[in-house]
Amino acid sequence: MDGNKRGWPVDIVSAVSGFAGAIYVYAWTRSLILVFGMGVYTASVLMAAALIGVGAGAWMAARSTVREREPVRVMFFLAIMAGVLGLASQFIIGVIPAVYVWAYFSINDQPALVLVIQFLLGFAAMAGPMAAMGMAIKVSGRIVRSELAMDMTLGGAAAGVLAAP
């Protein structure tokens, strides 16, 4: 597919996806830090959960044997799916405090296990939307066959970080 003909919509969606991803990670981290407490380890495990989700999504898209007839439509669908899953993750975040309190008091004497529980709960909230974003990023790279889609995604992510309060 010629990147010059259909590249700019892909670039725009890539930038918006990166922006939304950064805002989502920021919002999830702020929400979950209220439950887990503020600390370097907490922020680190939540960031790791988000990055593993994006990486898993890109890996799934790369391993996909299905070749899309309309990859632009697939990319737009994945970007919309990431947004819908991001909204749905708010329900998961609403359940996390009860699960975490139970787990915390069950294993309070084992700090490493507490971090594992934080990672798993954070990953449960972020996995769907982050994987969909990772898939959308990989598909956008297939469409334009250049690094520009990734650059636009990272530029959008940087703008999202700067825009977050």
Image: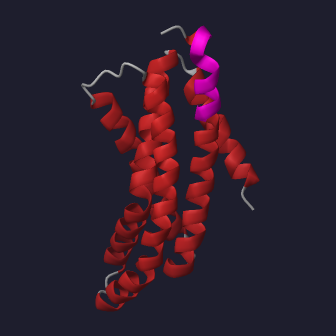
Residue 20 shown left or right of residue 96 in the figure: right
On the image, the x and y values in percent for residue 87 come to: 52, 60
Q: Up-down: is 136 above or below 11?
A: below
Residue lying furthest bottom: 105
Q: Main secondary structure of the magenta part?
A: helix
Q: Is residue 15 magenta?
A: no
On the image, the x and y values in percent for residue 63 come to: 27, 30
Please report the residue visible at 49 percent of the width from the left and 53 percent of the height from the top: 84
Q: Up-down: is 135 above or below 46?
A: above
Question: Quadrant location of residue 159?
Answer: top right
Residue 158 shown left or right of residue 54 in the figure: right
Residue lying furthest left: 65
Please report the residue visible at 44 percent of the width from the left and 28 percent of the height from the top: 139
Residue 114 shown left or right of residue 19 in the figure: left
Nearest to the observer: residue 144 or residue 43: 144
Question: Quadrant location of residue 59?
Answer: top left
Question: Quadrant location of residue 147?
Answer: top right
Please report the residue visible at 67 percent of the width from the left and 35 percent of the height from the top: 155
On the image, the x and y values in percent for residue 75 come to: 47, 31
Residue 101 appears anywhere in the view: yes
**Bounds of the magenta span?**
4-14
Please report the residue visible at 53 percent of the width from the left and 50 percent of the height from the top: 83
Q: Up-down: is 33 above or below 43?
A: below
Nearest to the observer: residue 18 or residue 49: 18
Q: Up-down: is 49 above or below 65?
A: below
